Amino acid sequence: MRSYVANSKREMAEMLNAIGVTDMDALFMDIPWDARCKRQLSLDDGKSEIEVRRKFDAYDTSAARLPLFMGAGAYRHYIPAVVPALLARSEFYTAYTPYQAEMSQGMLQGIFEYQTYMCRLTGMDVSNASVYDGATACAETMIALRAATRKNKILYSAALHPEYIQTMRTYARFTGFELVEIPFTENGETDLMYAVRHTQAAAGMIAASPNFYGVIEDIAQMADFSHTAGILFVTVSNPLSLGLLKRPGDVGADFCVGEGQPLGIPLSAGGPYLGFMAANKTYMRNLPGRIVGQTEDAWGNRAFVLTLQAREQHIRREKASSNICSNQSLCALTAAMYLGAMGPAGLKEVALQCLQKAHYLYDGIHSIPAFAARYPKSAFFHEFVTDYKGDAIALNSKLKEKGFIGGLPLCRYFKGDTGLLFCATEVLTRSEIDGFLNALEVAVK
């Protein structure tokens, strides 16, 4: 059986009446009486979907996944079964860019629903139909800032993901941007006192919250700072964190971008992922990709149209400032299904569990003398940096032997950095976290 859909008593009565039998037993009249089970089955009380999944996973030791305490831009979250079940429908996974757009009403509606969800999630006015990943979204925003201001100077926080910064530098190398890196303070927060000296002739500033080091930054303050300086502000957000944190649109951000992988997309050994981009309506023509709108046809029926694609090559030809042709519709639809299945309450619960489990992990790690919190005065969501006195890579090897995937050694990005970036999400159980802490304590002795 691929799936099971529970029926109410009313639905069962309607079904029996439609096929002309009086009760459920009549459906099994061909099975001899002595071959039937005549007792109540000994079953546990009903369990949640994730509890049932864990129980079955425990039976299949060959497919066991090691508890994961590493994030850094790609996260293991629970994906409700309804999401992959619906995505497996052929009309979804065979869809591609609609070159005769209005003939593809189903695809356009899927994109429209995704854009609506992202606007509600971020508090922004308009969302595009996604780009390749969070790094691409961040880099594409530089072009949007230049288009909006006619300026080439971009300020960015050094606390952005290093791969986002690398992608931005690649874009800048060939397109004439001047990038100015804004360092962060001893608390892991973007240094606005440094930034104030570089706002002259700048287009905007890009900063993340939570940032790469897990620190929750004050984006309302950064938005006010940027606008006072006469520049635009872009925030890079983890979409799941918005189940608890204030929405960027509500605190004055001009653009909100980031990686949508946490919204129902599995880790998949690196992709495909989902770069989301949303903006204040003033700057909607500066977004790359496609924007779908809702209208009515000649008969008054609800219909969808490809409303705007102001930067795309098939519209602007040689003047195009974006050449991302695919609309990433399958990944965007995945995110829409995930958000629809979770709802506001589910999204808040996931974010809350991430927060609580990460803080439980944080307290446990820093009770071990070999570790010291790097930013003890700063709030964090589900990631944090701790300094380790020994060899972080060797430590992770020992942890893997004990059945755990440890944190990300920051020396992989920054030579000589002794830090480990740990992450905890809602899929981790307390017993897994406790087991990891015990293994960690043994491994550092």
Image (tube, rainbow, N blue to C red):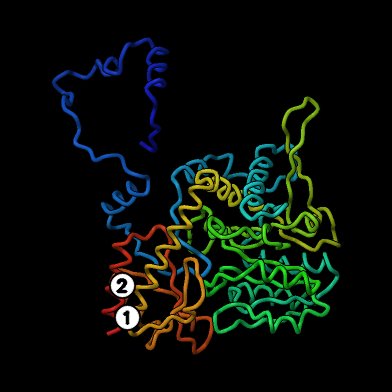
**Residue 201: % across, % down:** 83, 78
Q: Nearer the viewer, residue 135 or 145?
A: 145
Q: Judge whether residue 334 can be spotted in this image.
A: yes
Picture layout, residue 41 above or below residue 282: above
Q: Which residue is mark 2?
A: 437
Local packing at callout 2 (Cα closer than 10 Å; few below 14, some 14-19, many 20+) is some
Residue at x-position 54% and y-position 60%: 241
Residue at x-position 50% and y-position 70%: 380
In the picture, the disc for residue 368 is 1
**Residue 246: % across, % down:** 60, 59
Q: Quadrant of residue 319?
A: bottom right
Q: Judge whether residue 272 can be spotted in this image.
A: no
Picture layout, residue 128 above or below residue 190: above
Local packing at callout 1 (Cα closer than 10 Å; few below 14, some 14-19, many 20+) is some
Tell whether label 2 touches label 1 (CB within 8 Å): yes
Q: Is residue 364 left or right of residue 293?
A: left
Q: Secondary structure at mark 2?
A: helix
Q: Quadrant of the N terminus?
A: top left
